[in-house]
Image: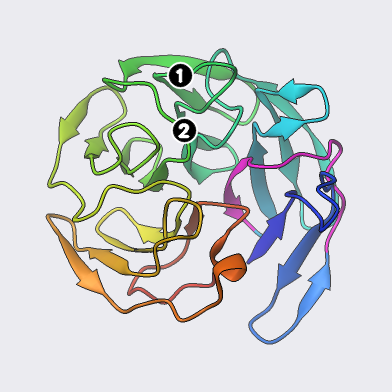
Amino acid sequence: SMTGGGYDTSSGRLASTEEYNGSAVTAGGNLGTARSAPSGTGTLTAGLVHGGLTSSGEVRTSEEYDGSSWSNGGTANATGGEHSGMCGSQTDAVSAAGYTGSYETMIEDYNGTAWSDTGADLPVGKAYIGAAGTSNDCIFFGGDQSGDVTQSFNGSALTNEASMSTSRNVFQSAGVKDDVIMTGGNRYTSNNSEYWNGSSWASGPANSEALGQRYSTSDNVDCSGTSASVFF
């Protein structure tokens, strides 16, 4: 697992990243551009970061990680900025929405080189949205507009699924399409959690961490499912 970007305690944007091997956290390679609120997906040796807020404003650029260093990726047409919902791999990813000065609705695919419009749009623009799955078999959930909505995506069209129990944004989540855990929300005011089993949401345990510890740099992290996750 890894985390990158965000703010330091002086509200300066970070380019640094950190890697976790199950027992210890070590420094990773620095992003080419310091950014807060980006989206990320992929693996530790083939990662992808997209969007975020830089010193010059919201961006739609992406960077790719090879396990030690970052290189420039493609620039999206609309998605990105402050936390789009993204999942998939470094060479086959999907990104939905984000805040780029306005709330976006477009869903875009990434092939490892370039971003392209899938032709599908979310019904409302939103940011700080969760995502889990692959580029053509995933779910999008939550966000700061219509924050209890869950929709599945098959690569070309959206389908409405069961709503979350609580409307929320800026939460932490991890999993695969049919097995997701999410906790927190509304930046850090919520401490409860929910499980998604592929058809419905159910209440999970409370998060006992202090308020500041529930404010995450990243809403969504891919893992192998079974609700075993690492949140930074």
| Residue at x 32%, y 68% (from the top left corner) | 193
- Helix, strand or loop at label 1? It is loop
Q: Is residue 37 magenta?
A: yes
Disc 2 + disc 1, Cβ < 8 Å: yes
Residue under numbered circle 2 = 127
- Magenta part of the chain: 28-43
Q: Residues within 10 Å of mark 2 (few under 14, many from 20)?
A: many
Local secondary structure at mark 2: loop
Image quadrant where residue 112 sits: top right
Percent across and percent down for residue 65 are 75, 47
Q: Amino acid at mark 2?
A: Ala
Quadrant where the image shows the N terminus? bottom right
Depth order, front residue of 201/135: 201
Q: Magenta-highlighted stretch: main secondary structure?
A: loop
90 up-or-down from 184: above or below: above
Amino acid type, mark 1: Glu
Q: In x, y percent, where is residue 86?
A: 48, 40
Q: Which residue is identified by label 1?
A: 104
The residues bearing labels 2 and 1 have C-alpha atoms spaced at a distance of 8 Å
Which one is nearer the viewer's eye here, 221 or 224? 221
Residue 205 in which image quadrant = bottom left
Instruction: Name the residue at 81% across, 48% down.
Output: 11
